[in-house]
Image (cartoon, rainbow, N blue to C red):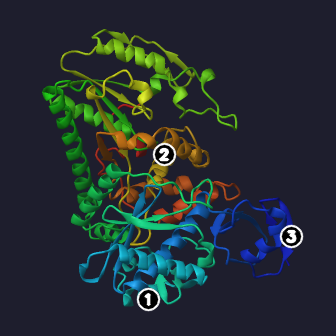
């Protein structure tokens, strides 16, 4: 008999060898009284589907669809149902699940022969999805050699999956079936379609929006909000991916194998520089031609989006336009650490707007707008005290003030400054490359890997520390940053097509240092598995002014 400890209640029970996680859960269910339906589990801190069978003593933690791996299991299972329904109703159609948007997932659907997609077509797909769920069709995992999986997908014309598996270096591969439909997913699924009670499907822009449960209450749909500017930034990146023939990881890997890594780096950097030049020229135009010329440039974005390097590169381009940028960070206006608001767990809430002394910042902005010389503070992150060290700013006739920080677009900071004098920029790493047509790459994974590497290299935090704090970071972004992103005048995508291949060379050894006996190992294991899909590329040809240098080191810019 096996000894299985349930971490949800710290109780150990005996089970026969080969018992499934579903068997174990049914034994524990009455005493656990989980608040929401269980969809997956962690076994020794590694995500597994509920059909996973146990043959040794293990720790097991059951998960619902609220956050983390449980939410990912639910979402990718729902994506499979959508794919099956779409191809059942419209054989030889193509479905591309591209990226998260509007608290759902944007999908591009192409009918055979490029026929127009109608509301009636949408309803047919919805009905078929509901039929599959009502039938409670089982998801079946098939473990095979990589060669066998390649044969299966090649026969069905799945070139995206063939390229991924050809370059993955794997010996064995799991693929899934739902009825007579075959697909590939890089993580476990729920046992059967009947688990998927909460979902929605509707038209969005020129495609579809697959709606998913709310992360805090999975019994209801996540509230949708429109993101037209974010959609256009994604669409622009996808158009460039198509031009460069880099729509998925297999494309990137094959380009690297053919010796084009250097060219991919150069083109990606050139595209970003072209965008920065365009933004600088627009600021210059509005500075000189508007009735109320731009005087303040506000730059924000979520953690590890590359705001600091972007600000420095933009400053250089503004100088090239003949403008003289002056800059400071909202971080310099932090209240002293003893005055910082606290999270419910007693930790400092560094992302709260109350962390910033809005009254002092507003006063300094008003005085700068009046042409006064102002001594601005510098926050000492070692002592946790705001200091005045003689740094003084004064706006000249050819000056623009650049304010960078996570709260820069929050209207509380600049409410007294007319909007006509402000130019707002939102920076984020919106990954457009996918693993394949049905496996998107979460945009937050790009930033999390950047942050893990930077924190480790600076000696600030271990990978375990960074992973542990990441949910708090994401919660703060939802509350304090993302609500203002659609108010930006322009958005800048800091992600690079070849970035994950470069990050792999830095992240592998750092992620491998996370102990298996801690909760953070689950996320470290997932990220390691994910970056192993990419053929590693050295960072030696990443230029010193690249946004990536802010995270992997070697930047020619000075950072505090």
In the displayed structure, would residue 130 be above or below residue 344? below
Identify which residue, 87 or 390, lies in the foreground. Answer: 87
410, above or below 169, in the image? above
Q: Which residue is mark 1?
A: 152
Where on the picture, by quarter, is residue 325?
top left
Q: Bin the neighbour count of mark 3 within 10 Å (Cα to Cα): few under 14, some 14-19, many 20 and up.
A: few
* Neighbour tally class for label 2: few under 14, some 14-19, many 20 plus, Cα within 10 Å: many
On screen, residue 76 versus residue 55, left or right, reads: left
Q: Nearer the viewer, residue 283 or 127?
A: 127
Disc number at residue 451?
Answer: 2
CA distance separating discs 1 and 3? 41 Å
Query: In the orientation shown, which residue stands out farthest toward the top?
Result: 372
The residues tagged by marks 1 and 2 sit, at their Cα atoms, a distance apart of: 38 Å
Residue at 46% in and 75% down: 126
Residue at figure coordinates x 57%, y 22% from the top left: 384
Q: Position of residue 195 (x, y in %)?
A: 63, 73
Q: What SS does tag 2 mark?
A: helix
- Residue 159: x and y in percent read 34, 80
In the foreground, 250 or 506: 250
Q: Mark 3: which secondary structure?
A: strand
User: Callout 1: few (<14), some (14-19), or many (20+) C-alpha neighbours within 10 Å?
Assistant: some
């Amino acid at each position: 008999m096996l000894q299985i400890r349930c971490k949800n209640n710290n109780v150990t029970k005996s089970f026969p060898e080969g018992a499934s996680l579903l068997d174990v859960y049914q034994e524990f269910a009455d005493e656990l009284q989980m608040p929401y339906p269980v969809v997956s589990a962690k076994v020794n801190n590694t995500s597994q589907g509920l059909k996973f069978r146990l043959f040794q003593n293990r720790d097991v933690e059951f998960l619902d669809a609220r956050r983390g791996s449980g939410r990912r299991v639910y979402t990718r299972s729902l994506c499979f149902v959508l794919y099956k329904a779409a191809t059942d109703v419209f054989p030889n159609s193509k479905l591309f699940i591209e990226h998260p948007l509007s608290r759902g997932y944007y999908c591009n659907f192409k009918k055979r022969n490029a026929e127009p997609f109608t509301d009636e077509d949408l309803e047919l797909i919805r009905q078929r999805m509901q039929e599959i769920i009502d039938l409670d069709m089982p998801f079946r995992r098939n473990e095979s050699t990589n060669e066998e999986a390649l044969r299966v997908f090649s026969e069905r014309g799945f070139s995206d999956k063939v390229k991924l598996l050809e370059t993955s270096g794997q010996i064995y591969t799991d693929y899934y079936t739902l009825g007579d439909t075959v697909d590939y997913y890089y993580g476990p699924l729920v046992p059967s379609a009947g688990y998927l009670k909460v979902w929605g499907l509707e038209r969005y822009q020129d495609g579809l929006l697959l709606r998913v449960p709310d992360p805090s209450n999975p019994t209801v749909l996540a509230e949708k909000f429109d993101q037209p500017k974010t959609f256009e930034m994604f669409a622009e990146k996808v158009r460039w991916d198509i031009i460069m023939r880099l729509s998925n990881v297999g494309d990137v890997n094959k380009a690297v194998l053919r010796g084009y890594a250097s060219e991919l780096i150069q083109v990606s950097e050139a595209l970003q520089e072209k965008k920065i030049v365009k933004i600088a020229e627009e600021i210059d135009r509005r500075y000189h031609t508007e009735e109320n010329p731009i005087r303040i440039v506000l730059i924000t974005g979520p953690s590890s989006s590359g705001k600091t390097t972007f600000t420095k590169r933009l400053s250089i381009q503004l100088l090239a336009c003949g403008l003289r940028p002056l800059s400071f960070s909202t971080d310099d206006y932090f209240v002293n650490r003893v005055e910082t608001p606290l999270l419910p767990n007693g930790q400092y809430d560094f992302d709260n707007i109350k962390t910033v002394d809005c009254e002092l910042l507003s006063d300094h902005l008003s005085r700068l707008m009046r042409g006064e010389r102002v001594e601005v503070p510098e926050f000492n992150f070692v002592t946790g005290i705001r200091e005045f060290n003689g740094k003084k700013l004064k706006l000249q006739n050819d000056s623009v003030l650049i304010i960078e920080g996570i709260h820069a677009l929050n209207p509380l900071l600049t409410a007294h400054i007319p909007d006509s004098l402000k130019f707002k920029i939102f920076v984020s790493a919106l990954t457009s490359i996918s693993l394949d047509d049905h496996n998107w790459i979460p945009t937050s994974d790009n930033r999390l890997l950047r942050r893990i590497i930077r924190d480790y290299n600076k000696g600030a935090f271990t990978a375990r520390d960074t992973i542990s704090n990441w949910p708090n970071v994401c919660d703060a972004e939802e509350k304090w940053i993302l609500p203002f992103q659609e108010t930006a005048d322009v958005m800048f995508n800091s992600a690079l097509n070849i970035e994950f291949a470069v990050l792999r060379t830095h992240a592998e050894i750092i992620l491998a240092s996370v102990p298996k006996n801690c909760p953070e190992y689950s996320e470290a294991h997932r990220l390691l598995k994910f970056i192993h899909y990419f053929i590693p590329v050295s960072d030696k040809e990443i230029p010193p002014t690249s946004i990536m240098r802010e995270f992997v080191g070697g930047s020619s810019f000075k950072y505090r």
